[in-house]
Image (cartoon, rainbow, N blue to C red):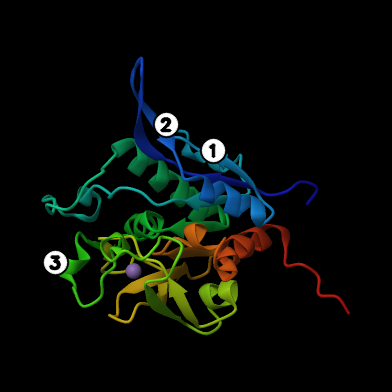
């Protein structure tokens, strides 16, 4: 490949207060773009828009579906919203569903982070726990902001399946990860293989069987890689899935 791989990143809707008013904006933490850069990719941000997912998917070599607010539970068959379900943005849901359908159909290498793994699951017909502590288990605290542990530091372990995309990305089967989610994967979507679990048995990583490279993780490696370098692994593996693994000397 003559150019560095272009990685399309989906942003979060947010509001910016300025002296001349409040502006609705789309933004992402800079750690997403710096992680992609550090792995050898060119980050570009893909804002919500109507009906352009197929064309956008054709502009990029890889995709990163980022973290953020909750998916409208109507998309996995639940009319009622749990009191903690929030941050829903219909345009973001639609764009990310569209991009992931393209990624699945065209075999575009894709990394799905936090909300991203949940979108991936729902696109493939899976369901979510609208609130893990209330509807699954409160044994393990998955909302790290409640424990005072810094966002770049781990708060629980994940056990990865040997030989999976996850184990290969980290070069290990026992990982230490951060945790900033109140929702979680319930029934898995079609073709998704569970490849990583937290100690309470929640599925925290999946890959799509038969796809060249599609990995979902429930934690935030982009927040961790600067302090814990193994967390650059998923970004490097995404880039390598596009350009090919580096040649081994000798
Ligand atoms: Mn967790």
Residue that sits furthest to the front in the current view: 148
- Is residue 80 visible to us here? yes
Q: Mark 3 or mark 2, which is nearer to you?
A: 3
- Tell me the element at label 3: helix
Task: Name the residue beneath numbered marker 1.
Answer: 56
* Residues marked 1 and 2 touching at CB (< 8 Å): yes
Residue closest to the eye, 233 or 125: 233
Instruction: Say which mark, if any, is on residue 49.
Output: 2
Left or right, residue 220 beside residue 76: right
Give the Cα distance between marks 3 and 1: 38 Å
Residue that sits furthest to the right in the current view: 250
Instruction: Say which mark, if any, is on residue 205.
Output: none
Number of marks in the image?
A: 3
Left or right, residue 112 beside residue 22: right
Which residue is painted at 27% across and 50% down in the image?
70
3 or 1: tag closer to the N-terminus? 1
Instruction: Say which mark, if any, is on residue 134.
Output: 3
Give the Cα distance between marks 1 and 2: 10 Å
Give the Cα distance between marks 3 and 2: 34 Å
- Is residue 192 visible to us here? no
Q: Is residue 64 above or below residue 196?
A: above
Left or right, residue 211 beside residue 187: right
Which residue is painted at 15% across and 54% down in the image?
78
Q: Is residue 31 above or below residue 141?
A: above
């Amino acid at each position: 490949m003559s150019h560095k791989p272009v990685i399309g990143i989906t942003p979060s809707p947010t509001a910016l207060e300025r002296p001349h008013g409040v502006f609705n904006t789309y933004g992402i933490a800079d750690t997403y773009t710096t992680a992609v850069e550090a792995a050898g990719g060119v980050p570009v941000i893909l804002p919500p828009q109507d009906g352009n997912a197929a064309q956008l998917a054709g502009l990029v070599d890889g995709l990163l579906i980022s973290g953020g607010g909750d998916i409208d539970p109507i998309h996995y068959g639940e009319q009622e919203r749990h009191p903690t379900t929030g941050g829903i943005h219909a345009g973001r849901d639609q764009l990310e569903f569209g991009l992931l359908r393209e990624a699945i159909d065209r075999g575009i290498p894709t990394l799905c982070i936090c909300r991203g793994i949940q979108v991936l699951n729902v696109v493939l017909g899976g369901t979510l726990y609208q609130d893990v502590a209330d509807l699954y288990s409160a044994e393990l605290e998955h909302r790290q902001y409640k424990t005072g542990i810094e966002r770049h530091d781990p708060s629980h372990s994940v056990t990865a399946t040997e030989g999976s995309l996850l184990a290969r990305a980290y070069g290990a089967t026992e990982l230490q990860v951060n945790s900033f989610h109140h929702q979680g994967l319930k029934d898995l979507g079609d073709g998704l293989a569970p490849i990583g679990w937290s100690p309470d048995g929640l599925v925290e990583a999946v890959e799509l069987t038969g796809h060249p490279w599609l990995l979902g993780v429930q934690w935030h490696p982009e927040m961790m890689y600067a302090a814990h370098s193994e967390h650059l692994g998923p970004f490097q593996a995404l880039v390598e899935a596009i350009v090919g693994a580096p040649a081994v000397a000798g």
